[in-house]
């Protein structure tokens, strides 16, 4: 969660509610959008000196906006290029499938049917997002490039971390990998659906 938050505010200073909205829209399959988890992560980042806080009033409401510090940029630059820790990708929920054979047959079938139905809904949702992203990619890159260029601090941070010479190239790289992640999600769900449908077929046949 801490590194997800750093990734967000490296590109744009945000309030916790703006971060949460972004996670709900784009990263719901990757991390939790629990305010409690986010507040705990932000507290740690502030204590480490990776994030600074600016308070301001908007519509008679006190708000806190979070930005990455120079120390945070240095840490993030070291972290972002390191390989994924496969051990941390394991899901406790998937462990339930390992022990599903303990359940009665009708519960196993109900479990599989519900899982398949939920995954099909998620797959269709991702297809809609992919279609929208494909149609708006160029506009999104141009808009984000313009926004970042207007802020010298954001520009400096992004070029420092990315190693690119231009904001346009850095933003294009970011956008491309976000699309790759979406494509990965679609491919994974498709493969999982094929697998679980095969198991359901075996259950119904009584194998």
Image: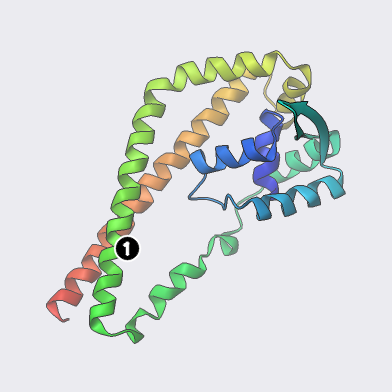
State whether residue 31 is above or below residue 109. Answer: above
Query: Is there any visible trace of residue 81 in the rendered image?
Result: no
Please tell me which residue is depicted at 33% across the width and 58% down the height of the picture. 192
Q: Residue at x 55, y 23 (%)?
A: 172
Residue named by callout 1: 115
- Whole-percent x, y for residue 193 in the image: 28, 57
Residue at the far front in the pictured view: 60
Residues 202 and 65: in front is 65
Give the percent coordinates (x, y) of residue 15: 70, 35
Q: Report the side of 154 relative to 93 (left or right).
A: right
Say which residue appears at 37% left-offset and 52% top-offset: 188
Q: Is residue 114 left or right of residue 36?
A: left
Q: Tell me: residue 71, above or below residue 133.
A: below
Question: Quadrant of the rendered structure where residue 8 is?
Answer: top right
Quarter containing the C terminus:
bottom left
Q: Is residue 37 left or right of residue 102?
A: right
Relative vertical location of residue 144 with respect to residue 91 in this rendering, above or below: above
**Whole-percent x, y for residue 153 in the image:** 78, 22
């Amino acid at each position: 969660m801490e590194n997800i938050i750093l990734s967000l505010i490296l590109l744009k200073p945000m309030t916790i509610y703006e971060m949460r909205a972004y996670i709900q829209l784009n990263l719901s399959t990757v991390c939790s959008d629990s305010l409690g988890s986010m507040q705990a992560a932000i507290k740690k980042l502030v204590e480490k000196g990776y994030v600074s806080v600016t308070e301001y009033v908007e519509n008679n409401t006190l708000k806190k906006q979070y930005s990455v510090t120079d120390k945070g940029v240095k840490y993030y630059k070291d972290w972002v290029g390191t390989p994924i820790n496969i051990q941390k990708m394991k899901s406790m929920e998937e462990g339930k499938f390992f022990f599903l054979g303990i359940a009665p047959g009708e519960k196993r079938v109900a479990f599989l049917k519900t899982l398949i139905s939920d995954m099909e809904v998620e797959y269709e949702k991702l297809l809609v997002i992919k279609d929208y992203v494909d149609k708006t990619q160029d506009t999104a890159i141009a808009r984000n490039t313009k926004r970042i260029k207007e802020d010298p601090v954001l520009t400096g941070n992004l070029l420092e971390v990315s190693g690119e010479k231009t904001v346009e190239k850095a933003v294009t790289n970011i956008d491309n990998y976000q699309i790759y992640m979406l494509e990965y999600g679609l491919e994974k769900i498709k493969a999982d659906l094929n697998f679980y449908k095969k198991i359901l077929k075996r259950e119904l046949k009584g194998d």
